[in-house]
Amino acid sequence: MVKRKIFQLFAIILVAITFVGSTAVAQETISKVNTDIFPKAEKGYKKMIIEVPYSDQDQSKRIEFNIGKYMEVDGCNHFALQGSVEKKDLQGWGYEYYVFKTDGAVIGTQMGCPDLPKRNLFVSAQPTMLRYNGKMPIVIYVPEEYSVQFKIYTASPEVYQAAEEMQKTK
């Protein structure tokens, strides 16, 4: 009889802990926008999605994304992919998405370095910087042979004051 009551008490406690834990997780979960509302990728393109976690500090963060591909290049020069990122409006929703267009041309410095081994380098176009938003995905359409990499930047909580330049009197 005592064992049975202890077992029942244990079961009730276990259920209560599970319920409380589930409630806490549910409150922290932020519903993201369904990416199916964005257009399908056009022929020759693919849809890339950046999703980041929501936090109370979203306003102090930024996301930088780079579009490019890995290429075998020489050992000393700097390279960049030519192309442009166009911001588009998802009509009727108020959301934005991005389309990368390129002809695949790569520019680079022209230092001579025949003795250095070749390297596999992610050659990318000019980076794009956006506000961080943990509630919204970033949707980017890129040509099929390209990919997207991103970084998250966080601002320091320190705030600095600019100095005023005093006018010289004659």
Image: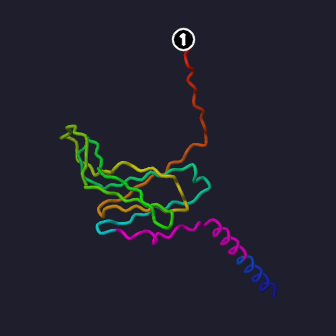
Q: Position of residue 40 (x, y in %)?
A: 38, 71
- Residue at position x 64%, y 70% in the image: 26
- Quarter of the image holding residue 17? bottom right
- Residue at position x 28%, y 52% in the image: 120
Q: Is residue 40 above or below residue 53?
A: below
Q: Is residue 32 above or below residue 14?
A: above
Q: Position of residue 35 (x, y in %)?
A: 46, 69
Instruction: For the N terminus, give its image quadrant.
Output: bottom right
Mark 1 belongs to which amino acid? Lys
Which residue is the extreme one toward the right?
2
Magenta span includes 22 = yes
Magenta-colored segment: predominant secondary structure:
helix
Magenta span includes 121 = no
Q: Is residue 23 left or right of residue 153?
A: right
Closer to us: 46 or 85 = 85
- Quarter of the image holding residue 159? top right
Q: Position of residue 168 (x, y in %)?
A: 55, 16
Per the image, the residue denoted by label 1 is 170
- Residue at position x 36%, y 68% in the image: 41
Which residue is the extreme one toward the top?
170
Closer to us: 39 or 156 = 39
Task: Give the magenta-colored segment's residue range.
Answer: 16-41
Closer to us: 107 or 73 = 107
Instruction: For the C terminus, give its image quadrant.
Output: top right
Closer to us: 87 or 48 = 87
